[in-house]
Amino acid sequence: VQELKQLRLKDAAGNVTEYQIPTLDEALKWARGKTILVLDQKDVPVAARVKAIESHQAESYAMLIVNSFHDAAEAYRLNPHIMLEVMIPNRDKVVAFDKLNIPWRNVIAFVGHDPPEDLKLYELIHARGACCMIGTSRNLDRKFVTGKVKELREIENDYRAFLKRGADVIETDIPVQVGPLLYHATPVPASKREFFHAPQNKSAD
């Protein structure tokens, strides 16, 4: 950890900033009242991530990505107040998840990086009181990031098509660009406004 703390993060333009790599504890402490964190699984056990959330009483602003229904069941058993992002890409998975007896209010259903065209799937998830999340980091985002499209507005209708299909939440690698594109007419609350602007770089060394 101490070795990593010697490093500084770079901004999107490649300039070195004053910011260090935060630990999970530091991120959870910082996020309170500012944003919602989604803790990916990687190689960190469910129990360890649940414990981290509990230690900061972060159940209201930190959620877990779980890689299987088994992990979803474990997380719910350990703490029934933590939100879960669960892969539910088809109707069969909806039925299978029902059998776990985990309340759907505890879930955001990730339907995939290639969002299904099955409108009934979105309807079934919504009827159970859960939101649907789709991923654009591996498809639409790449068109912009790789320069295949010069302006994101060129594919705005493609993003909106996912929302019309039934997506409630978009997982994107370029939220600074996608957010204003889709929700420019939605005012940012004054209490959160400072967090929607990139900080000025104080060091370009």
Image (spheres, helix red, strand yellow):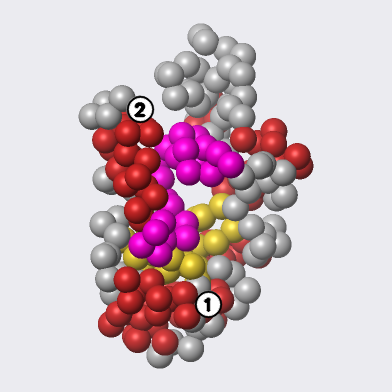
User: Which percent across, then down, holds residue 204?
Assistant: 52, 10
Residue furthest toward the left? Answer: 148
Q: Residues within 10 Å of mark 2 (few under 14, many from 20)?
A: few
Q: Position of residue 125 (x, y in %)?
A: 43, 76
From the viewer's perspective, is residue 183 above or below residue 57?
above
> Height in image: 130 above or below 189?
below
Name the residue tied to disc 1. Answer: 129
Q: Residues within 10 Å of mark 1 (few under 14, many from 20)?
A: some
Towards the viewer: 116 or 79: 116
Q: Nearer the viewer, residue 140 or 200?
A: 140
Residue 17, by quadrant, is top right
Q: Which residues are magenta?
A: 163-185
Tell whether position 171 is magenta: yes
Q: Where residue 31 sits in the image (x, y, percent)?
A: 65, 47
Direction top: furthest residue? 205
Judge left or right: residue 69 versus residue 113.
right
What type is the residue that disc 1 sits on?
Gly
Residue 52 in the image: state x and y as whole percent.
60, 59
Residue at 63 percent across and 74 percent down: it is 81
Image point 23% across, 29% down: which residue?
A: 148
Q: Is residue 158 left or right of residue 63?
A: left
In the figure, is residue 198 to the left or right of 163? Answer: right
Q: Which residue is mark 2?
A: 151
How many discs appear? 2
- 4 or 139, which is in the foreground? 139
Mark 1 falls on what kind of element?
A: loop
Disc 2 secondary structure class: loop
**Residue drawn at point x = 28 percent, y = 74 percent:** 90
On whether residue 122 falls in the magenta region, the answer is no
Can residue 183 be seen?
A: yes
At label 2, the amino acid type is Glu
Foreground disc of the pair 1, 2: 2
